């Protein structure tokens, strides 16, 4: 089936010409920078080439990782796509929904935070000991970066581009945006990639004028000359403005949560329970409530909605990614790229006409006041307070956008393109220069690879300007033990919260009251973004002056904060004393500490069969590109199996085998039992005492011994190819922990080696010498990868090894075949 027919059979409608061009570029081995207006179908333009390549078995990545800057966008697009794609092949990975922490599905929808932290070896969804599992998921994958313009140029955008420079041809890439200037697009195509390693091609509607005439989000309603009329006023956005101009479906977007909440309550008072449906959404809701609201918003404003009397009051959380539409849009001024995303939710569907009203955040009197104030300290303080109304955006960019919009009476593709190029070219040049000066965060990426510490999050992905709050009854929980990570949290802008905290502290109900608390335990990390276990911590009082330097969850007394499902979190006394709900445990990763006995031979053969079953068929593209990347071709499948065979070589050490045999004999009551073991029958609760008695917890580490052995074998076998030896050795060395760096003294007798040779002969490898082996422990600095080429191979190998090890251990019956 050709691509066009395949597209139509999946989605029920024919692709636009530009969507076919995107497929042509990607399937020919190149990469795409896609810039089309909101609502023009860029999501399916990027996803359908992947589905087509998979069905037609083309040389294309077998995994798609689709990254977005916000959880709301990720949830929305995931919901849209999974209605078409098989449930078994698609997953979502965010801080809210963690159903694929290892990025194992064919299609993974992820926030940019989850994607980048995985490549940087501090995945937010996993513990430190598992830090190197996910980086290999990106190597050899098809990477889509949607709403690219929303990334922080200093952090996530720069790190993303740095990652792509490192990956080179080891992936396929589609960067998508509706609101980056032509100069930035051409920078990505030409200057970012001066050696043309990515073969980026730019796709815009400029080369497909016929598409512009039929894309429903761009074509005017049948009785209108234009699709969207634009009205710019020096007024501020009020409830009165919204109600007066309301027709059928109205969306009002504010820059700040407090403003959205206040106007929502003002509208509610005026409507007084009338027929008009009224909704409010912003960042200060519990995840469960926000998810429910997203469903209602799609129901009322989605393509198939029959609703004709509804008002949505929102912040920028809906400005991109949600496939919704209104006939009347009100918005406070924001930078042009943000504004156009907002306007993209107006008259988005076929045969719709809309009106977009744009308001300043300061009224005329307040602007005059700024110009009249003298430059005393008090005046400067007042000016700063007024200018802060533009936050979280840059005031100058907002003002420039506001003035430019005053020259426009309606919005169409050409006018939007002109506005973007006029307003953003200067600021984007500065942005590009800053990214180049920091060499796309190369040094920070490599630093995160070295120590795999989540502290690098703030230097590479997102500057944490928010605090996560949990509402509890502090009056009764002071100094109590608590499981801190089990609660849903509400994210609040840090400096807003500090301002609240100072005021609340001055007006506390009682001098002895705890308003704020923190959870403390020995060795806890302030950068644990996802809870790893259910160990309890103690609530301690958190003073106001400590909050500025506190980056962990803050527990707040629910008598001082009000929460409602319709308006969210607000600061006021006499609240309804809501308590934060518990997270859904089904969305959390839990570790299993129960093992079934398997022998050394059974376990390792199980790993190889797991590789054959679960991984091999998906690695054709990766193997092809790996050979190009290394500049020489190896039998990569053979090398992977060699790593799997030798990964537990250190378990042959007699000092490792002895406590295992002692334990299994006592467990079974058979004093003569003997096998060369990989695991025993062990339950972390039932067998804890017996394990301590047999000193199982005192076994020497085994990974370094296998790492040392594979290094020597590969170095000798492949003409002293040290890079290959380092990558393979490092995968074994760090297959239980990224902190492993040495091997211990060991003894392996030739009797035990028979089990190893049985395995090696069966899979076509050279036998180990038939002699006892003894070595004195030492550091394995020589095994550390020295460059990006070695590091990427290590990521592939250690991912396959660790996942095969997990799967074969959990379900040996599935993978061990005699």
Image (cartoon, helix red, strand yellow):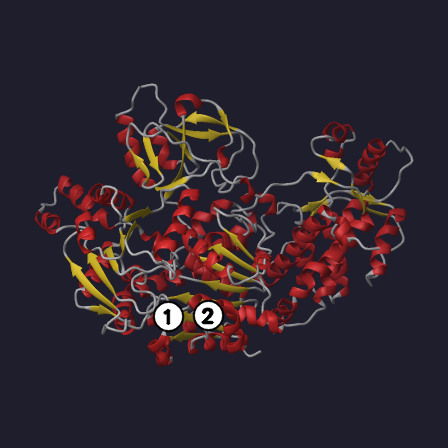
> Height in image: 591 above or below 51?
above
Who comes first in sequence, dot 2 or dot 1?
1
Q: In the rendered view of the protein, which quadrant contains the C terminus? A: bottom right
Q: Please report contact status of discs 2 and 1: CB closer than 8 Å, yes or no.
A: yes
Give coordinates of residue 434: x percent, y percent.
36, 60
Q: In the rendered view of the protein, which quadrant contains the N terminus? A: bottom right
The residue that appears at 50% across and 36% down in the rendered structure is 486
Q: Nearer the viewer, residue 107 or 766?
A: 107
Can residue 709 be seen here? The reply is no
Q: Residue furthest left?
A: 372
Give coordinates of residue 151: x percent, y percent.
39, 57
Q: Nearer the viewer, residue 482 or 326?
A: 326
Residue 684 figure quarter: top right
> Height in image: 723 above or below 393?
below
Residue 69 figure quarter: bottom left
- Image check: 53 left or right of 281? right
The residue that appears at 52% across and 53% down in the rendered structure is 92
Tell me the distance, in whole angstroms, between the alpha carbons under discs 2 and 1.
11 Å
Callout 1 crowding tier (Cα within 10 Å): few <14, some 14–19, many ≥20: many
* Element on which disc 1 rests: loop
> Height in image: 743 above or below 183?
above
Residue at which label 2 appears: 45
* Element on which disc 2 rests: helix
Q: Nearer the viewer, residue 758 or 358?
A: 358
The residue that appears at 14% across and 56% down in the rendered structure is 234
Give coordinates of residue 87: x percent, y percent.
57, 57
Give coordinates of residue 655: x percent, y percent.
80, 39
Residue at which label 1 appears: 36
């Amino acid at each position: 089936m050709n691509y066009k027919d395949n597209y139509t059979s999946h989605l029920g409608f024919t692709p636009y010409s530009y969507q076919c061009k995107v497929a042509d570029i990607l399937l020919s081995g190149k990469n795409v920078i896609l810039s089309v207006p909101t609502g023009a179908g860029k999501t399916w333009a990027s996803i359908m080439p992947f589905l087509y390549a998979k069905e037609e078995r083309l040389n294309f990545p077998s995994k798609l990782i689709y990254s977005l800057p916000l959880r709301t966008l990720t949830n929305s697009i995931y919901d849209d796509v999974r209605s078409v794609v098989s449930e078994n092949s698609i997953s979502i990975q965010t801080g809210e929904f963690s159903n694929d922490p290892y990025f194992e599905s064919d299609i993974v929808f992820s926030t940019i935070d989850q994607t980048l932290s995985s490549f940087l070896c501090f995945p937010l969804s996993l513990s430190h000991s598992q830090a190197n599992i996910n980086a290999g998921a990106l190597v050899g994958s098809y990477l889509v970066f949607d709403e690219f313009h929303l990334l922080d140029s200093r952090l996530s955008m720069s790190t993303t581009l740095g990652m792509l420079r490192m990956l080179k041809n080891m992936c396929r890439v589609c960067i998508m945006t509706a609101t980056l200037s032509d100069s930035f697009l051409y920078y990505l195509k030409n200057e970012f990639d001066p050696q043309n390693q990515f073969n980026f091609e730019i796709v815009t509607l400029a080369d497909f004028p016929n598409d512009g005439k039929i894309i429903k989000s761009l074509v005017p309603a049948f009785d209108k000359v234009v699709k969207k009329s634009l009205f710019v006023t020096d007024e501020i956005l009020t409830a009165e403005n919204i109600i007066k101009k309301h027709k059928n479906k109205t969306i009002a977007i504010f820059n700040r949560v407090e403003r959205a909440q206040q106007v929502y309550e003002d509208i509610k008072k005026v409507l007084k329970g009338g027929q008009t449906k009224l909704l409010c959404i912003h960042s200060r809701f519990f995840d469960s409530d926000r998810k429910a609201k997203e469903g209602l918003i799609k129901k009322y404003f989605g393509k198939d909605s029959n609703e004709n009397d509804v008002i949505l009051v929102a912040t920028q959380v809906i400005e991109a990614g949600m496939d919704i539409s209104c006939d009347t849009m009100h918005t406070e001024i924001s930078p042009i790229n943000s504004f156009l995303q907002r306007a993209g939710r107006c008259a988005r569907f076929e045969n719709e006409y809309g009106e977009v009203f744009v308001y300043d955040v300061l009224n005329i009197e307040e602007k005059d006041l700024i110009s009249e104030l003298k430059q005393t300290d008090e005046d400067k303080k007042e000016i700063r307070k007024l200018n802060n109304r533009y936050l979280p955006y840059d005031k100058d960019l907002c003002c420039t956008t506001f003035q430019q919009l005053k020259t426009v009476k309606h919005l169409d593709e050409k006018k939007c393109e002109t506005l973007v190029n006029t307003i953003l070219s200067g600021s984007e040049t500065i942005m590009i220069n800053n990214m180049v000066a920091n060499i796309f965060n190369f040094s920070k990426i490599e630093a995160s690879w070295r120590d795999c510490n989540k502290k690098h999050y703030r230097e590479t992905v997102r500057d944490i300007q928010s605090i996560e709050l949990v509402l509890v009854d502090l009056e009764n929980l002071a100094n109590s033990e608590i499981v801190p990570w089990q609660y849903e949290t509400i994210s609040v802008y840090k400096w807003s919260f500090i301002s609240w905290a100072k005021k609340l502290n001055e007006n506390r109900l009682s001098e002895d009251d705890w308003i704020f608390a923190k959870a403390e335990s020995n060795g806890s990390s302030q950068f644990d973004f996802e809870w790893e276990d259910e160990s309890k911590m103690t609530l301690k009082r958190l003073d106001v002056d400590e909050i500025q330097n506190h980056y962990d969850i803050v527990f707040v007394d629910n008598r001082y904060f009000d929460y409602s499902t319709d308006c969210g979190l607000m600061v006021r006394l006499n609240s309804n004393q809501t308590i934060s709900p518990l997270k859904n445990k089904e969305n959390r990763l839990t570790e299993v500490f129960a093992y079934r006995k398997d022998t050394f031979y059974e376990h390792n053969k199980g790993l190889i069969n797991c590789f054959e079953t679960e991984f091999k068929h998906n690695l054709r593209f990766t193997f092809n590109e790996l050979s190009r990347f290394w500049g020489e071709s190896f039998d990569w499948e053979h090398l992977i199996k060699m790593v799997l065979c030798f990964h537990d070589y250190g378990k042959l050490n007699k000092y490792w085998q002895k406590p295992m045999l002692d334990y299994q004999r006592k467990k079974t009551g058979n004093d003569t039992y003997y096998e060369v073991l990989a695991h025993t029958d062990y339950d972390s609760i039932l067998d804890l005492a017996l394990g301590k008695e047999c000193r199982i917890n005192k076994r020497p580490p085994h990974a370094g011994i296998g790492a040392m052995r594979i290094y020597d074998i590969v170095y000798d076998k492949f003409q002293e190819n040290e890079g290959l030896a380092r990558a393979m050795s490092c995968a074994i060395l760090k297959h239980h922990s990224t902190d492993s760096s040495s091997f211990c003294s060991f003894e392996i007798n030739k009797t035990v080696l028979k089990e190893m040779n049985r395995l090696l002969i069966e899979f076509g490898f050279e036998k180990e010498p038939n002699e006892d082996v003894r070595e004195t422990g030492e550091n394995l600095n020589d095994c550390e990868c020295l460059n990006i080429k070695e590091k990427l191979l290590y990521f592939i190998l250690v991912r396959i090894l660790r996942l095969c090890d997990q799967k074969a251990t959990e379900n040996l019956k599935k993978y061990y075949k005699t």
